[in-house]
Amino acid sequence: MPKQDITVLKENDLLEIFDDLPAYRIKQIFQWLWTKNITSFDEFTNLPKSLREALDNQFYLPELTVKNSQKAKDGTVKVAFELSDNQLIEGVLIPDGKRVTACISSQVGCNVGCRFCATGKMGFSRNLSVGEIVFQVKQLNTLAEKTYNHHLSNIVFMGMGEPLLNYQNTMRAATILTTPEGLNMSPQRITVSTVGIVPKIRQMADEGVKFNLAVSLHTASDKIRNSLIPVNQSFPLSKLQEAIKYFYTKTGNRVTLEYLLMKGVNDSDKDVRELAAFTKAFPCKINVIEYNPVEGLNFQRPEKDRFDKFVDFLKSRNLIVMVRRSRGKDIDAACGQLATKINAGNS
Ligand code: SF4
C-alpha cells in the first residue's frame, strides 16, 4: 500500500490504526507534528524506535523545501516552496511596523480562473493537505523570526487557491494554528479570504467559526463580475450579499470586502456608487487595493487621482475604508507569479 500523509489523520484515526497504543503516545505524535519543524519520524525522539519505524512504514510527513525566495525593497519576502510531488506553492511575508502577516496558499493552482490573477492562469493541480498548510505557516514563522526578529502576527489565506474549495483542510489547519501545539494564535488574527463560494460562507456561519472572513468582491456589478470572476455566474451578487449578511448575523464578525482597483474596469463613479449600495446590507470594512500588474495580463492600476477619488467617495458615505498599497513591487509579489516563472524556467 502506498504511504499516506500522516497529517490527513486525526487523533481518533491513529488510535484506531494503533489500537494497542496508549492515548498519550498519540498526543505526543501530534505534538511533534504541529510544534516542531520536523522532517522525519526519526526526530520524534520521545517515541520508542519501534513506533517510529511503524509510522515510517505507513506514513510520510509533508515536505516543503524552499525553492526560491525574493526580498523586496519594502521588506516583503516571497517564498516558493516545493512539495513532495515537485509541485510549487507560494507564501509571502508582509512586514508592517511590528506586525508580520503571512499570506499563505491553500491549493496548488486554482480552478476559479479570475481573469486578473496569475494563479488563475495556471489551472488547478490539487488541494494542500492540513499538514502542508500548517508546515507552510511554521516555515514562514521561522523565516519571519530570522528576517524581522518577530514572529507572525497575522495569517491570511489569500495566496494560491480558493480556500473555501479546500474547506475541511483549511478549517482544520486554521484551527490547529490557534492551539498551543500550533502557533497559539487568536482566531481573530486569521483571515480566510474567498471570491464568494456562497454555500461555504454559510457553512462557516453555521459552524460559528471565529476566523475573520474576507470576500474578494472587486465589483458590485454582476455584469462586470461575471467577466472577471467566473464563479459569479453560479453565485451572483444577490446570493453573495445574503450569505455575507447571514455570516454577520450568525458570528457577529464584520466581513472585509476586498476591492482590487483596476483602471477602466471597476474604478468609475458608477462602480463606487454600486459598491456603496452593496454594503448597505451589512456592517463591513472595505480594503481598496492597488493592483499589482501581472505579466501577460492586460490590467493596470488607475492613476492616483482616480484611486483617491474612489476612496474619498466611500469615506464620504461613512464606510470604514483601508487603502492597501501594492507591496513588493520590485519582486514577483502578485499571487502565482513566482511559481509561474519557476515552472517556466525563468527564475
Ligand atoms: S484570485 Fe484567488 S480565487 Fe481567483 S484565480 Fe486567483 S487564486 Fe483563484
Image: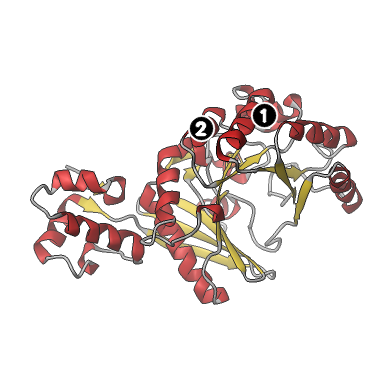
Tell me the quadrant of the picture where the C terminus can be found: bottom right
The earlier-in-sequence mark between 1 and 2 is 2
The image shows residue 70 at horizontal and vertical percentages of 58, 66
Q: Is residue 320 left or right of residue 346?
A: right
The image shows residue 142 at horizontal and vertical percentages of 46, 70
Ligand 1 picture quarter: top right
Q: Which amino acid type is shown beneath numbered disc 2?
A: Lys
Which dot marks residue 28? none
Colour basis: secondary structure
Q: Which residue is mark 2?
A: 200
Q: Is residue 158 left or right of residue 294?
A: left
Q: Secondary structure at mark 2?
A: helix
Q: Is residue 87 visible?
A: no
- Quarter of the image holding residue 178? bottom left
Give the residue at x 36% y 61%.
Answer: 181
Comparing 121 with 246, the one in front is 246
Comparing 345 with 32, the one in front is 32
Give the residue at x 78% y 43%.
Answer: 262
- Quarter of the image holding residue 282? top right
Which dot marks residue 241? 1
Q: Is disc 1 in contact with disc 2, using a CB cutoff of under 8 Å? A: no
Q: Which amino acid type is shown beneath numbered disc 1?
A: Gln
